[in-house]
Image (tube, helix red, strand yellow):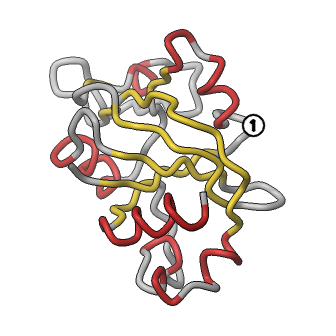
Amino acid sequence: MRYWLMKSEPDEASIDHLAKAPHHTLPWTGVRNYQARNFMRDTMQVGDGVLFYHSSCPEPGIAGIAAVASTPYPDPTQFDKKSPYYDPKSDRETPRWTLVDVVFKKKIALIPLATLREHAELADMRVLAKGNRLSITPVTEAEWQFITKHLA
């Protein structure tokens, strides 16, 4: 089992949207970074743990716990000309972008970025690295255990 931190803008897809979605499941659409895509395509497995992180908002932080709920499949937004995630260079035979579905596990009191920075146990978390902009980053088992046992 692996663990991930997945960022979403809460006005687009929040932990509350996930909790209210049919079957408490949403597709993780719109990833347009190759490294993040490769994590979903090549490494994520059904059942992997997810720290659901709200980003690009007044107070960014971990807002809930989820899990990977599907194997990767083509992100349909890459083919939708009306979508902000449309990619004219992608085609259906060889899609450029993939996604996984995530399923809601629980909502938690927001763990702000500043709180994560306060704990030496989390000093090496990729989300805390200067200049990190990836929407999906791996989380070590030790980081997962610390967050879920002591902060969530």
**In this rendering, position of residue 49 left or right of residue 56:** left
**149 or 72: nearer the eye?**
149
Q: Position of residue 46 (x, y in %)?
A: 24, 33
Q: Residue at x 39, y 37 (%)?
A: 67
Extreme residue in the front direction: 149
Give the camera-side residue of 50 and 57: 50
Q: How many marks?
A: 1
**Residue 112 in the image: above or below residue 93:** below
Residue 57 image point, x, y percent = 77, 55
Q: Residue reaching furthest top?
A: 22
Q: In which quarter of the image is residue 143?
A: bottom left
Callout 1: helix, strand or loop? loop
Q: Which residue is drawn at 41% across and 33% down?
A: 87
Indicate the position of residue 5 as horizontal and vertical percent values: 45, 56
Question: On the rendered structure, is 94 left or right of 28?
Answer: left
Q: Quarter of the image holding residue 14?
A: top right
At horizontal 50% and vertical 70% (from top left) the residue drawn is 127
Query: In the rendering, at what x and y percent does residue 52 appear?
Result: 54, 47
The residue furthest bottom is 120
Q: Please state which of residues 50 and 29 is positioned toward the viewer in this rendering.
A: 50
Disc 1 residue type?
Asp
- Quarter placement of the C terminus: bottom right
Image quadrant of residue 93? top left
Residue corresponding to mark 1: 11
Q: In this view, does 87 lie above or below 130?
A: above
**Which residue is found at the position 66% from the left and 55% from the top?**
55
Q: Residues within 10 Å of mark 1 (few under 14, many from 20)?
A: few
